[in-house]
Amino acid sequence: MLVRLHKHMAACGIASRRKSEELIERGKVFVNGRRVGEPGTKIDPSIDEVTVSGKLVTVPRKLVLIMNKPKGVVTTMSDERGRRQVTDLLPDMDVVLKPVGRLDKDSEGLLLFTNDGDLAAQLTHPKHSVPKTYRVVVEGLVDESKAKRLQAGVWLPLDKGEKKGRKTRPAEIHSLGQESKANRTTIEITISEGRKRQVRAMFDSVGHTVLELRRIRFGPISLGKLPPGACKVLTKSEVDRLRTAIEKGESEHSARPTRP
């Protein structure tokens, strides 16, 4: 399969696509011993040998890792404000892993990381509808009518750049108990989309502020007893289950009736 040289270099972790283009233009890149000066040159990674400044470019192994993100840690690769970030918690590895989606600073729980860009894109694309489950503690006692509204879908405020609001897809709601004295409710909610701070916005829309939010499942992968701040590399079997969930979500999405 032919790919553009600068994209191959970026996929192998040499540099960003733009920086890879610059390395090629500066004459630092050789393919099968011949200097290449055109970033758009196509190669076959399975047979072509690429070197950058004399160093052989190798295709990195594809990994998927889960982290139990603690509260107060930001989901970024770098932070100008100096806050603690998820990359500080990743183990030393021979590949560069990036988070799949995000959890906001005040949320905790299961966060996926991978160096497989295609898999990450599929897991986060709306058409694949991979479900995510959260355990949420909200202020107030959530009654049955509000739970049904959340299940059916609620209208949320406009996101930046949107011209009209959107209704959330149907969700699964399970009440885990109410504390009358503390005036709070614990709920498990499963959604099949990932708009920014969606779970918080959904509960805000029915008049309940989220006090605690923890993601406990992403598709078929559960957080289990992984301690806060700890990480675990997924097995091939677990990654295969993720891919199956993607295929199932795409099939269900294709079968949905389109809006008139």
Image (cartoon, helix red, strand yellow):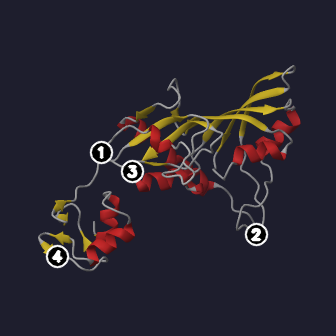
According to the picture, the residue beneath numbered tag 4 turns out to be 35
Disc 2 crowd rating (10 Å Cα; few below 14, some 14-19, many 20+) is few
**Residue 4 visible:** no
Q: Which mark is residue 163?
A: 2
* Residue 15 coordinates in the image, percent (x, y): 34, 62
Disc 3 crowd rating (10 Å Cα; few below 14, some 14-19, many 20+) is many
Q: Residue at x 60, y 41 (%)?
A: 132
* Residues at marks 3 and 4, CA–CA distance in whole angstroms: 28 Å
* Residue 239 coordinates in the image, percent (x, y): 41, 40
Instruction: Say if 23 sits above or below 76 in the image.
Output: below
Task: State the SS at label 3.
Answer: loop
- Amino acid tagged 2: Lys
* Residue 247 coordinates in the image, percent (x, y): 49, 49
* Residues at marks 2 and 3, CA–CA distance in whole angstroms: 34 Å
**Looking at the image, do the residues carrying marks 3 and 1 touch, with CB atoms under 8 Å apart?**
no
The mark nearer the N terminus, 4 or 2, is: 4
Quadrant location, the C terminus = bottom right
Quadrant housing residue 133: top right
* Residues at marks 2 and 1, CA–CA distance in whole angstroms: 44 Å
According to the picture, the residue beneath numbered tag 1 turns out to be 94
* 53 to the left or right of 70: left
- Amino acid tagged 3: Asn
Q: Looking at the image, which residue sits at the far left?
A: 33
Instruction: Say if 68 sits above or below 200 in the image.
Output: above
Task: State the SS at label 2.
Answer: loop
